[in-house]
Image (cartoon, rainbow, N blue to C red):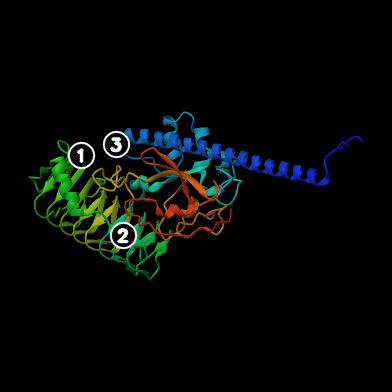
């Protein structure tokens, strides 16, 4: 009797084979997908590394200052570092977000391609026309961009008819009942309470911890030791032509007849009382910084182009006519109060201010990150975005961590640092990074929805 031959696979065997193939295919495809994503992450990290090297090269040629976010045509990080990165057009695009949006980006779209006919934000950011990028810069790395117009240890009292073009910060509190027009933000370590007809274009953020301007006395001492100022010997003449640093031992009480030659920085060991016409009527602005250990008072009609640092209180009482016209930062070790008429505009920050030229950089500070926008200045209190695909899509100034907290790399983003390194960082750990020397890390929970 012959042995019966098996004619084929049984149904059970076929099902086993099909299931096995499906499982193996799934594993293979998943592994392939992970491999492709890993390759994209690696490319993204390489891009960020190249951008950081370009920014570092930029800083070497700019006395230690990193790129800025001034946001005028050609004057923010992308065009600023383009000469140091010949491949910036490709290096500025993450493979997971290389397709351009028509404005603000998302976790999967790059920001850019802005035109006047685009979304609502387009008209406000013409400087970004023609640029496409998946990354944003931590603008704390260039602290000069975030130096307030007024920084005060004591209370700031805004009265009179004042115009301020820049941010105002106090470690104590901000108040007043005048008609101030403030084209910037208010930040305070205490309360903010403005009455009257004050107008504030930016945000008002009270009760911020660690709001602290630089020490005027320490800055004074640094200038003395570093620049060797020349004593002023005449009450009618300040001559910066031979040495841009001059010092008055005692009080400075100029009249309108004082002659100023050149421009520079005047140190005063006592008080400063600038009244009447200063400089002489019709002679233009006095181009000088003033840093005094005592109180500083401006009244009458004063026109100074330069920063004012007062170790004590600073008061402004602009009388009728042109009032007080200042072009530069103000720092006070005491309080700040204003009455009358005055216009105070942001000006170039003096090179000796400890907040500029990399003075506040820390070794592990983030530089460039996956982002939906060109830049961001995160605060510890910033919330976790409700939508990790969009992030902080409204670009709120009180939620700038959300520009970086996006689900771009499976619950992570890539980050480069001021030492040139680049790493992948889980979203919750963004709140643990040392964004600035004053940043206080905190713990957050980011929902695992990917």
In this view, the mark in front (1 or 3)? 3
Q: Residue at x 35, y 66 (%)?
A: 207
What residue is shown with label 2? 211
* As drawn, 337 above or below 427: below
Earlier along the polypeptide chain: callout 3 or callout 2? 3
* As drawn, 224 above or below 155: above
What residue is shown with label 3? 63
Q: Residue at x 44, y 31 (%)?
A: 85
Q: Front-most of 361 and 351? A: 361
Q: Front-most of 268 and 222? A: 222
Q: Front-most of 372 and 225? A: 372
State left or right for residue 103 relative to residue 19: left
State left or right for residue 138 relative to residue 120: left
Dot 1 lies on which element?
A: loop
The percent position of residue 57, horizontal first and vertical second, equals 36, 33
Instruction: State which quadrant residue 71 falls in.
Output: top left
Q: Residues within 10 Å of mark 3 (few under 14, many from 20)?
A: few
What residue is shown with label 1? 262
Q: CA distance from mark 1 to mark 3?
A: 24 Å
Dot 2 lies on which element?
A: loop
Dot 3 lies on which element?
A: loop
Look at the image and tell me whether residue 279 can be seen.
Answer: no
């Amino acid at each position: 009797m012959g042995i019966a031959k098996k004619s084929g696979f049984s149904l059970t065997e076929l099902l086993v084979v099909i299931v096995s193939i499906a499982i193996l295919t799934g594993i293979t495809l998943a592994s392939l997908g992970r491999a492709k994503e890993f390759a994209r992450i690696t490319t993204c990290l390489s891009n960020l590394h190249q951008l950081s090297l370009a920014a570092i090269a930029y800083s070497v040629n700019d006395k230690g200052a990193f790129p800025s976010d001034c946001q005028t045509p050609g004057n923010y990080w992308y065009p600023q570092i383009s000469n140091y990165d010949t491949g910036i057009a490709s290096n500025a695009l993450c493979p997971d977000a290389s397709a351009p949006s028509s404005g603000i980006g998302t976790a999967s779209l790059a920001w850019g391609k802005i035109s006047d006919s685009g979304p609502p934000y387009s008209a406000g950011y013409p400087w970004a026309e023609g640029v496409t990028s998946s990354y944003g810069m931590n603008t704390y790395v260039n602290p000069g961009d975030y130096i307030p117009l007024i920084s005060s240890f004591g209370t700031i009292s805004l009265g009179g008819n004042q115009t301020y073009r820049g941010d105002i910060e106090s470690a104590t509190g901000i108040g007043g009942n005048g008609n101030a027009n403030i084209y910037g933000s208010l930040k305070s370590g205490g309360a903010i309470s403005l009455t009257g007809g004050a107008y504030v274009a930016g945000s008002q953020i009270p009760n911020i911890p660690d709001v602290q301007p630089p020490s005027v006395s320490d800055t004074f001492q640094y200038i003395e030791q570093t620049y060797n100022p020349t004593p002023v010997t005449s009450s009618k003449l300040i001559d910066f032509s031979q040495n841009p640093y001059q010092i008055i031992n005692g009080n400075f009480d100029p009249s309108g007849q004082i002659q100023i030659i050149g421009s520079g920085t005047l140190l005063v060991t006592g008080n400063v009382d600038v009244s009447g016409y200063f400089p002489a009527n019709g002679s233009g602005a006095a181009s000088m910084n003033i840093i005094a250990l005592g109180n500083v008072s401006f009244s009458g009609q004063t026109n100074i182009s330069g920063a004012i640092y007062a170790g004590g209180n600073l008061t402004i009482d602009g009388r009728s006519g042109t009032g007080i016209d200042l072009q530069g930062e103000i720092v006070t070790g005491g309080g700040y109060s204003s009455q009358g008429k005055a216009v105070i505009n942001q000006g170039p920050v003096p090179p000796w201010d400890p907040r500029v030229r990399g003075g506040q950089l820390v070794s592990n500070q983030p530089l460039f990150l996956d982002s939906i926008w060109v830049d961001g200045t995160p605060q510890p209190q910033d919330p976790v975005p409700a939508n990790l695909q969009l992030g902080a899509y409204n670009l709120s100034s009180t939620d700038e961590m959300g520009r970086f907290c996006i689900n771009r790399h499976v619950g992570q983003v890539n980050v480069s640092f001021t030492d040139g390194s680049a790493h992948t960082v889980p979203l919750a750990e963004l709140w643990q990074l040392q964004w600035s020397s004053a940043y206080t890390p905190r713990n957050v929970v980011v929902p695992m929805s990917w």
